[in-house]
Image: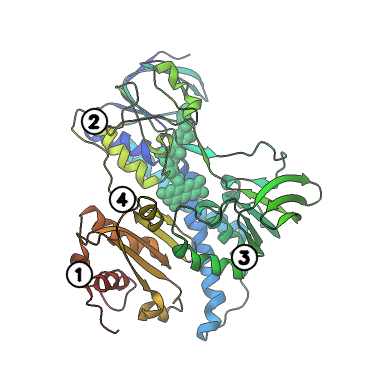
Amino acid sequence: PSPQAHAELLVIGAGPGGYTAAFRAADLGRKVTLIDARPTLGGVCLNIGCIPSKALLHVAKLIGDAAEGAAHGVRFGPPQIDLGAVRDWKDQVVGKLTGGLAGLARRRKVTIVQGMARFTGPHEVEVETPDGSRRIRFDQAIIAAGSSPVRLPFLPDDPRIIDSTGALELKQVPQRLLVLGGGIIGLEMAQVYHALGSRITIAERLDQIIPGADKDIVKPLMSRISARYDAVHLETNMRAVEAGETLTVSFEGKTGNWQAGYDAILVAVGRRLNGARLAAEAAGVTVSDQGFIPVDAQMRSSQPHIFAIGDVVGQPMLAHKATHEAKIAAEVACGHKAGFDPVAIPSVAYTDPEIAWAGLTEAQARTQGRELRVERFPWAASGRALSMGRGEGLTKVLFDPDSSRILGAAITGPNAGELLAEAVLAIEMAADAADLALTIHPHPTLSETLGFTAEAFEGTLTDL
Ligand code: FAD
């Protein structure tokens, strides 16, 4: 082993949480070492998550838009897909971003160590690097170890059974793809493979797809995919898989039990936390049975000099939550007063249509027995939505009937994720209906639909 090294601040994991924390602490004057098992920076999000999936969804959008051109009077031929070139495009996007991060780390003199880290005491880790084992001592540490796809133990070991990482590799386009799990990741990848030519079946255990979002917001997506995919099975469990020439899957659902054959299965049933692999207990850090690390609002673990951020501290497992927590942890570690106290963390499914929501959902409000007024603006009444042929969208805002403050918002339709940002700002600033109604939205845009919900609340909505 090489001689011991020392870091004022050690960051484990170089995903959105880890690199943001490392950069912020370096900007505040700390000597930072950033460790990741991967050869490139960026974690799951940049390498095998948010970014490659969006690059492939862009390709799916091109194919989808061309296919729908006929409805608007423009006919294109069938797409000719060069899978290798699609893969290259995605890899190029990822490479630009991860390479960019390496430059940003260099500029800040952040020391990068590639290897798997494991705590050996409250101020020391051992790192398995490609050149052997190394010990690094630290004054403070931030754990940003992220999460990995859940594996189902009863599934056979077969190359046709893949997780999101395998799906993003895009090795081939199976004829019949079963997507197990109707959450965001499963549905995004289903959309990519459908556009590339796969026939898709979705199987979801719960009674709706995208379970965190309100049912009415999910409905337009459900209708669209039900019309395009082979099947969308809700309240359905996979019981077993027999791997022969095809993958024969036994299902158990509302209507009974049945079997069906597929050429590949994408398992997207959730993510497990990487907290358990770190031996964090050796540093005196409490790790829950589920593998997450409990933290306070300053992102401190049970060990005050060790912080944890991002997926490893629990839901929601989203990159933008990780980056915001990262800044708090870095600032507190550097002696600043800061705390993580988010008013609304947005969630977005980048499907077609997109599903985006933030703040309170209607289902949550009802469970809490909270007074509220819900205003919905159907996109069938939006000139811009109709001119895009997408009148099925919906904008919904939850208002407090007394203060008229905005408690939550949800949007479904193309670009819902971009549109939602305005509502997140409104919630963060404790804006009320009048603020939103008096904001002059450009016409004709989809953003007007947010203003219209507030006008409806105020009783000032006029005919369009
Ligand atoms: P991660 O990004 O998971 O990074 C953790 C890093 O730590 C990894 O690189 C890992 O190698 C390293 N590591 C772990 N343990 C050790 C150890 N012991 N030693 C050294 N290194 C270690 N989120 C969004 O907000 N928007 C999206 O559109 C989106 N799309 C997604 C699509 C897919 C297919 C997937 C899988 C996820 C997606 N996510 C998305 C979720 C997002 O990727 C995560 O929330 C985010 O990456 C979490 O960041 P993090 O910093 O907590 O950890």
For residue 332, the mark is 2
Residue linked to disc 3: 81
Q: Secondary structure at mark 3?
A: loop
Label 4 and label 1: CA atoms lie apart by 21 Å
Q: Quadrant of residue 32?
A: top left
For residue 439, the mark is 1
Mark 4 surroundings: few (<14), some (14-19) or many (≥20) residues within 10 A: some
The residue at the point 56 percent across, 52 percent down is 206
The numbered mark, 3 or 4, whose residue comes first in the sequence reads: 3
Foreground tag (3 vs 4): 4
Foreground tag (1 vs 3): 1
The numbered mark, 3 or 2, whose residue comes first in the sequence reads: 3
> Is ligand 1 less than 8 Å from the beta carbon at label 1?
no
Three-letter code for the amino acid on which mark 1 is drawn: Thr
Image location (x, y in percent) of residue 116: 49, 26
Of residue 149 and residue 366, the one placed in the foreground of this image is 366
Label 1 and label 3: CA atoms lie apart by 44 Å
The numbered mark, 2 or 4, whose residue comes first in the sequence reads: 2
Foreground tag (1 vs 2): 1
Three-letter code for the amino acid on which mark 3 is drawn: Ile
Residue linked to disc 4: 344
